[in-house]
Image (cartoon, rainbow, N blue to C red):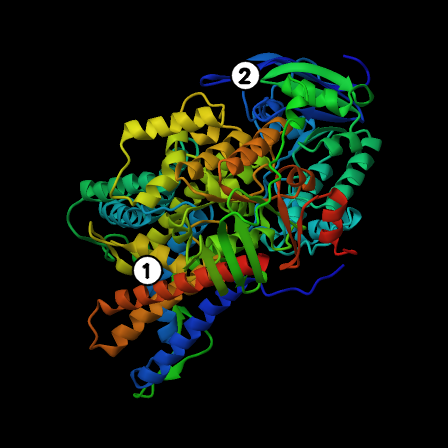
Amino acid sequence: MKTKSKLNSNTLLLLITIALFFVLYAGGCIAYGAKGFTHFQTFLNVMITNAGLISVACGLTVVMLTAGIDISVGALVAMDCMLLAVGMQNGIGAIPMIILVLVIGLVFGAVQGYLVGYLQIQPFIVTMAGMFFARGMTAVICTDQVAITADTNQLFYDIANAKIILPFGGYTNNKGVYMAPFIRVGVVIALLVLLIIFLMLRYTKFGRSLYAVGGSEQSAAMMGLNVKMTKLKAHILCSFLASIGGICYCLNSMQGSVQQATGFEMDAISSSVIGGTLLTGGVGNVIGTFFGVLINGTISSIVKTNGKLASSWPNILTAALLFVFIVIQSIFAAIREKQKA
Amino acid sequence: MDKDVILTARGITMTFPGVKALQNVDLTLRKGEIHALMGENGAGKSTLIKCLTGINDFEAGEIRMDGIDGPVKNHSTRDAQNVGISTVYQEVNLCPNLSVAENLFIGREPLTALKTIDRASYNKRSQIIMDDLGIEVDVTQNLENYSLAIQQMVAIARAVDMDCKVLILDEPTSSLDDEEVEKLFKLMRDLKAKGVSILFVTHFLEQVYAVCDRITVLRNGTFVGEYPIAELPRVKLVAAMMGKDLDALEAIEKENADFDKAEVVIDAQGISHTGTVKPFDLKIHKGEVVGVGGLLGSGRSELARSIYGADRASTGTLKVKGEEVKIAQPIDAMNRGMGMLPDDRKAEGIIGDLSIRENIILAMQAKRGALKPIPMKEQEAIADKFIDLLSIKCPSREAKINQLSGGNQQKVILARWLATDADFLILDEPTRGIDVGTKSEIQKLIIDLAKQGKSIMFISSEISEMLRTCNRMVIMRDGEKVNELSGDLTQEGVMNAIAGGEK
């Protein structure tokens, strides 16, 4: 027996997000085409700037799928950057420092995940403690702004400045020089993360149990899934991805500083929500999150290209978008209720 | 252990704070039998099941299973599934946001060579499973797109497919219609033929006699006895469950007065709610019990909801005691002396984490407004009065309502409306999921209230209980009020009216 397949409302939300991104981007192109917005590189720059955010937001989507939240990721990114900067300044190699940062991410997530999963403490509270801890530790490591230069660590510097030239989409500038489009290492890492998490969510037992736990924790337990372990793993993964994001972020900022990446967790949450992830859990997809990040990035880019708008405008536009999305989501939920009745 | 026995539980004891939930309870399940577990609400049926499935950690006693040496102690549902015990609960324990197929296979998905889940394979297998059971679904659709009945069938399909030796069905039929129940029974018999043992918990006596081989009866957390079905006629079964004779059931007597001259409390004219109820007229007199009959989905509840303002009426006028009123939301109805007991008491009635006292006071407080709190002394007095009056069984008035059994929760909600001095009560399925004893108590209560001059609208799926309590019956079909029966109500007459046969 085959019933005709209806367009799932979650899929529809994702399509709206994607469509919105294109509308926004097209708007930018029309308004600021003269300022070079139409160049492919502008889009690539959005990706380069937000490579770290993509990885962090993927992690948050994973946690939010279980109906959890993690607000420690921004502080963790700051701590990662500071560790990298100070460690390399003191002569430790780039590779050992990167490994250290990743291990710290795993441990950080394991502690938070244990508290959330096994001791059943509200994830908001747990990760708020984590946030204060990481931000505090950043200052303990060093209160100064520590820049990473070629002198600090040649390898890290080279990785950060490596241009990966794309074979298409270039343009010739007004001086007649061909500008080849490029991305940076961070973008490659972020896209790999995105691909892996997408496949994991869709095709692994762990991925599906995240959805099950978020859909109904009690049911998931009744069906024999290990809810506590699932939550623990989700937090480990989130903090690990935040550390990967931290490394990508550091490759852009090339410094460690206490005030770095403030509010980064909120950017990640808003990207997930705009991308269709529900805070109540069980619904969401990293492809949506990816477009959420791009939408946020495009808004910033448009405001920057305009040059006259105050830098607080991206916040206001993001607020407006979030508002629109929450309203659309609740309308969809209402329609679904009605259809069922 | 005997050869033909699959599971024994001996001397199971379990206490909750303040309550002995189970005391020295035995259970013996034989291979390939359908075994009913019967008892009133609060008898300990659910607790016993939770001991078997590893949710409750019982204090004393032991469980043994065929083929396993030594006692079995499950610590989680997964443990229980591993030894071959699967359970389907009254509330569907599935994930609405996953597809039907995923709900069938999650936690045990077939894997591909790459150790990833094999979607195509389990989608195909799921469709075969559901087709075999005669359940028409597209397994790739999310579960939330289907009705509660279908969801229940999916839950059963999941348990069945897990190669279980012991299948526990905890009130699986309470949300199914007759046809679906029949399908379920067929399935149960098929499974029995394959040697699966089924422990069947239900409140419907008919269903017990339709499929079961043996009955174990519990009362107040103790083991009353185990009987082959042939040796335990209905009357004896009820007596065993209640510990008293059936006389109480027969003693209900309704007032058969002539209400035409009594004051008209509710006078609805042309009330409708777009999409659910077509315009209807209805008069309800003081002291009258009006039943609303019809099939599930015929607009029974919706009729009540549109009067009460839970669904805002789209057309028509409503007069309460001769005065025309506008009811846009429930609080307006409450202020006019109406009260409503919704059919979904879990979602719309009780507030689980509040105490019994707080649940009783709730509507009264809402009516007074939040700025005029009722003094604690008064609250306690009111709560005690109703706990006593309705004989609500509870450890104390400060106990959380969650700890009460379904029937007692229902009484608390009833108390809530009685406390507001409501003189028109809408009771939507007040006896669903409630044992026979409490059922008859509630029916008696309805008649007593009517005698005191309250008007009652009584909605129920059980015609027999409406016959016993109602003075008049309104029949709904496809959202339309099709008939009104009064005088001598008979089962046949009501059935014909509901079915739409000759009048």
**Letter of the chain that mark 2 sits on in the rendering:** B
Within 10 Å of disc 2 (Cα), the crowding (few <14, some 14-19, many 20+) is many
Quarter of the image with the N terminus of chain A in it:
bottom right
Q: Nearer the viewer, residue A15 or A108?
A: A15
Looking at the image, the residue that sits furthest to the front is: B261
Rendered view: A231 above or below B392:
below
Q: Where is residue B48 in the image (x, y as percent from the top left)?
A: 61, 22
Rendered view: B102 above or below B193:
below
Residue type pointed to by label 2:
Met
Checking the image for residue B398, the label placed there is none
Q: Where is residue B339 in the image (x, y as percent from the top left)?
A: 45, 45
Rendered view: A172 above or below B403:
below
Is circle 2 on the same chain as circle 1?
no
Report the Cα–Cα distance between label 2 and label 1. 64 Å
Checking the image for residue B14, the label placed there is 2
Q: Position of residue B98 (x, y in %)?
A: 58, 50
Quarter of the image with the C terminus of chain A in it:
bottom right
Q: Looking at the image, is mark 2 or mark 1 nearer the viewer?
A: 2
- Which residue lies at the image location 47% right of the left edge and 23% below the top edge? B394
**Letter of the chain that mark 1 sits on in the rendering:** A
Looking at the image, the residue that sits furthest to the right is: B193
Name the image quarter holding residue B230.
Answer: top right
SS of the residue under disc 1? helix
- Which residue lies at the image location 66% right of the left edge and 28% below the top edge? B82
Q: Where is residue B66 in the image (x, y as percent from the top left)?
A: 75, 19
Residue A4 appears in view: yes
